[in-house]
Structure formats: structure tokens, C-alpha cells
Image (cartoon, helix red, strand yellow):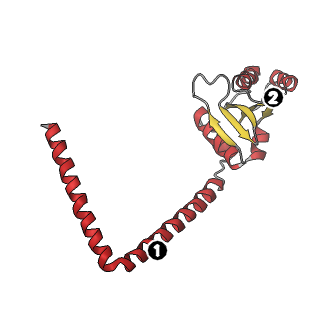
Amino acid sequence: MYRAMRRHAKRISKTNWLIIGIFLIALLDTYGDYILMLVIYTAMLWFSYQILKLLFVKRQRTKPNYLSIEEIDKLGGVQFEDFLEQLFTIKGYKVERTPVTGDFGADLILNRQGEKIAVQAKCYSNSVGVDAVQQALSGKAYYKCRHAMVITNSKFTRNALEFANTTKVELWDRERLQKEI
């Protein structure tokens, strides 16, 4: 029964298209010049709309939507990653998200002018330790990045600072994050 209904629906739609086609031919024969002008004006309006939409979307994308550091402190891990994605997009980076679990040590991959940076994001209330720097280095190797970075809304331990200095991992602590936003 279902197949019969589908065949019947196809026949009806073919018939409808035939009627619409005949109607359009009759209209073109009678009002051809007017319809041609209508099509041209419609196309011009559509292209104008598309251009304005592109300009508006670009302006909207670059409009800052910054949070205060106190608001950042209230974010969860994934929300902090969302915030950093928006921040780096505004700064001109192409941002790629990694899976929430099994990310091989990088939460975001930043790319600008062919230079890739693996970012480990830590939204903590306590100090961030050496393990975050190790994760960033792991993400750098796995995603074949040139640089690694750890960003937190908190502070880094002395060991993390020393290890990052030795391994050339860039660290953004609370103060640096506030400067960047």
C-alpha cells in the first residue's frame, strides 16, 4: 500500500510540474519583458542580500564578547575552552577543537599563517602543575604543532614554570589572560 501511495504521489507531482510549466510558458509569452525584469531585479536583490549578510556575519564574528576574570572563574572546563576558542578566533586564528575526551593533551589547535599551536586549557581554582605542561607537549607532538601553550585562569606552580621554561611551552596565567581579554 505504501508503494502505491508513493507512485501516486510521484504521478501527481509530475502532473503539477507540467501544469506549472504550461502556465509559465503562457505568462512568458504574454508578459515576457516584465517577467524578465522581475527576474533581474530579484537576482539583484538576492545578491545584495548575500553581500550584506556576509558583511554582517563578519562584523558579528569580530565583535568582542569578553567575560570578566570573575565570570571566567565560574566556567566549567568545556565552557572555558569555548571562551578561548572565541578569543583566539577574534585574534585571527583558525581554531580547531579536539575531542573532549581522548584529546592527546591538547584542547585547541590554533593555526595562523601555517603555524600550529597546541593549547591545553585549565580552568582551575588551584595552581596548575607540571602535568598540564606535559599534556601540552604531548598534544604538540601528536597534532604535529610547532608550539605548545597552557592557559589557565589560575597560577602555575614553580615546577610548572621551570619545566615550561626548559621545554619552551608558553604559559598564560591569570594576569596574562586578563591582559589578553
Q: Determine the image quadrant of residue 78.
A: top right
Residue drawn where x is 59% and y is 38% of the image = 79
Label 1 sits on a secondary structure element that is helix
Label pair 2/1, CB-CB below 8 angstroms: no
Q: On the rendered structure, is 104 left or right of 177?
A: left
The picture places residue 167, in percent across and down from the top left corner, at 84, 23
Residue 142 or 36: which is nearer the viewer? 36
The picture places residue 3, in percent across and down from the top left corner, at 17, 37
The picture places residue 115, in percent across and down from the top left corner, at 77, 37
Q: Which mark is residue 165?
A: none
Amino acid under disc 2: Val
Marked residue nearer the N-terminal end (2 or 1): 1
Residue drawn where x is 87% and y is 26% of the image = 165
Residue 44 or 74: which is nearer the viewer? 44
Q: Which residue is mark 2?
A: 169
Amino acid under disc 1: Tyr
Residue drawn where x is 83% and y is 21% of the image = 163
Q: Which residue is mark 1?
A: 41
Label 2 sits on a secondary structure element that is loop
Position of the N terminus by quadrant:
top left
